[in-house]
Image (tube, rainbow, N blue to C red):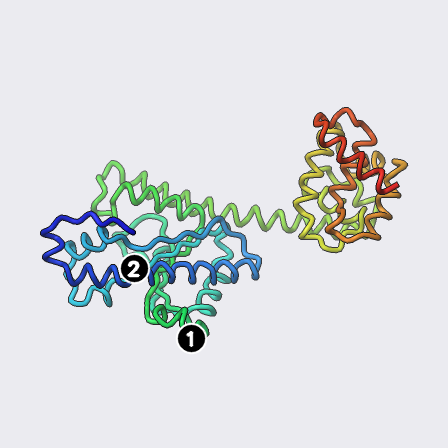
Amino acid sequence: MMQINIDINTWQDNSSTIKTFLEQEDDYKQLCNEVSFTLEKAIEKNKIEYSNISFRTKSLKSFLEKCERKIYNEPFTEITDFAGVRLVFLYQSDYINLDKLVYEFFNVIEKVDKLNNKSVDQFGYGAVHYIVKLKNEHSGPRYDSLKNLKCELQVRTVLQDAWSIIDHHLVYKNESEVPSQLRRKLNSLAGLFEIADDQFNQIRNERSNYINKIEESIKNSDTFLDTEFNIDSFTQYIKYRFEAKDYETHVLNAKAGYLIAKRYFKEVKNLREIDIALKFEKNSILYKNFFKDFSYSRINQFTILIHIIFDLDESGFTSEKAREKIKALKLKIK
């Protein structure tokens, strides 16, 4: 049972309000879970990259302090952040799609853009806040007590989140509150955060264009194999050499394979040198055929690469357990 630390005077002065808060507390926790779950599934389905989704419910102490600072006629109607969910995503350019998802999956009561709609005396690097409710699609006994409850949903990039954490400790909300000798530095810093977000977007776009060029070059083997050996080109090489169909499922395996290949082929400059090292190994054709005939759950490109490199230099596998596992699988294949 939750322990409540409130002095007797506070309890006597606010007993009815406290009772109502405690009666609704579990519902707000459940609301946080539902909003977080719905948001997570939506952004994963739409393949939007994000850092984390977190949530919290307002504590009784925080609620009572807020009621003391401000005057509310109907605190349970006027206060909108009893439940709070925060989505921290990676790239500012994804915000447009995230905004669409918020409107698609929730009833948006209010939207506050603290990034683009700052007043003239405000500074910093803000984010976007929504006040949302569950949609009518959430029906049944589980949702009956949640439908009319509001949740504050904050959507921000990693750098906006970092600014928010620093800003919270600085406690400066308006530019006029900032000492003059700090004002220029804080405004410059906020601008740098925004520039950094733009640069991350640009780097992602440039990387995407680079990968597209590599994919396009596969049509010409000579051009493709002359590509510099790096994590992006090697991922495409795995797809090219082992005829991988489910590319996204095996990207992580390709990345792990790249680290192994980097260890064993330290002086490699391009994909051609990797191809020469692997293509003519006696077991590579056997593994390739085995890969075609069995499901992805049994074997994948990473497994194949490990076996090929194992044949090149067994001594590099320092774990006796790992060596025995590889040998056992090799016997089954043969």
Disc 1 residue type?
Asn
Q: Is residue 92 left or right of residue 245?
A: left
For image coordinates 75% across by 29% down, the residue present is 264
Q: Do the residues labelled 2 and 1 touch (CB within 8 Å)?
A: no
For image coordinates 52% across by 46% down, the residue present is 200
User: Which sits earlier in the primary sequence, circle 2 or circle 1?
Assistant: 2
Disc 2 residue type?
Glu
Q: Is residue 139 left or right of residue 295?
A: left
For residue 304, above or below residue 293: above
Q: In this view, does 283 lie to the left or right of 187?
A: right
For image coordinates 42% across by 59% down, the residue present is 33
Instruction: Name the residue furthest front.
Output: 1
Q: Which of 133 and 290 is in front in this view?
A: 290
Instruction: Read off the residue under disc 1.
Output: 136
Q: Which of 219 and 27 is in front in this view?
A: 27
For residue 251, above or below residue 95: above
Q: How crowded is mark 1: few (under 14 residues within 10 Å), some or many (20 or more)?
A: few
For image coordinates 36% across by 71% down, the residue present is 147
Spot occupied by residue 110 in the image (x, y as percentages of width and height)? 34, 67
Q: Is residue 139 left or right of residue 270?
A: left
Q: Nearer the viewer, residue 313 or 270?
A: 313
Instruction: Read off the residue under disc 2.
Output: 25
Spot occupied by residue 190 in the image (x, y as percentages of width and height)? 36, 45
